[in-house]
Image (tube, grey):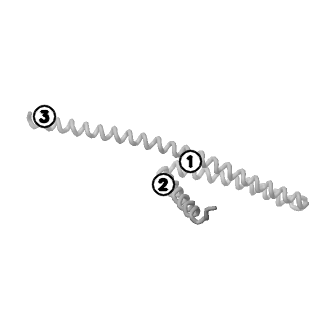
Amino acid sequence: MNTSDYIDDAADAAKNAANKAADKAAKTAARESEALKRDFSRLRSNLDAVKDKLGTNAHEVLDRVTDFLESTHLGARLDDVEDELSRLGSKIKDTSRDAAARVESEITAKPLASIAIAFGVGLLAASLLRRRAKTIPAK
């Protein structure tokens, strides 16, 4: 075997190793991509639930205020206040939709940072809940 054959064998070995590494990296990237897609899907559904909850709460507050005004017979004098509360309820709902849309666009723009933040918030919540569980006496 001459030097040229050794060089060809070494080049083939390097090429094979590079191909194996590229295949492994592609498979890992595909797995990570699928995991990220699942996480984003769950996050979007959670955001939708939050958005719906914010809208529902604003309407509940508005209904309670309206019931109070009618029960105290102040409704006739406070029609302007009721209109303002209705406008504010709509504004709150619109603002919550806008906020949810902005959060979703930020998550889409910066997926890794979003996952890191969500992870950090989860750790913080777990820590607070764990601490709270320790301070509440058992019955």
Quadrant assignment, res 10: top left
Question: Do labels 2 and 1 touch, CB within 8 Å?
Answer: no
**What's the residue type where badge 2 is placed?**
Ala
Residue depicted at 60% across the width and 45% down the height: 45
Q: Nearer the viewer, residue 23 or 128?
A: 128
Q: Residue furthest front?
A: 139
**Nearest to N terminus: mark 2 or mark 1:** 1
User: Relative to residue 115, is residue 132 depicted above or below?
Assistant: below
The image shows a total of numbered marks equal to 3
Check disc 2 and report the residue beneath it: 116
Closer to viewer: mark 3 or mark 1: 1
Check disc 1 and report the residue beneath it: 43
x then y, percent, for residue 32: 43, 44
- Left or right side of 62 for 97: left
**How far separated are the C-alphas under marks 2 and 1?**
13 Å
Closer to viewer: mark 2 or mark 3: 2
Q: Quadrant of the C terminus?
A: bottom right
**What's the residue type where badge 1 is placed?**
Leu
**What's the residue type where badge 3 is placed?**
Asp
Q: Element under label 3?
A: helix
Q: Element under label 2?
A: helix
Question: Do labels 3 and 1 touch, CB within 8 Å?
Answer: no
Q: Element under label 1?
A: helix
Check disc 3 and report the residue beneath it: 5
Local packing at callout 1 (Cα closer than 10 Å; few below 14, some 14-19, many 20+) is: some
Quadrant assignment, res 136: bottom right
**How far separated are the C-alphas under marks 3 and 1?**
56 Å
x then y, percent, for residue 48: 63, 47
Residue depicted at 79% across the width and 58% down the height: 84
**Nearest to N terminus: mark 3 or mark 1:** 3
Q: Quadrant of the N terminus?
A: top left
Local packing at callout 3 (Cα closer than 10 Å; few below 14, some 14-19, many 20+) is: few
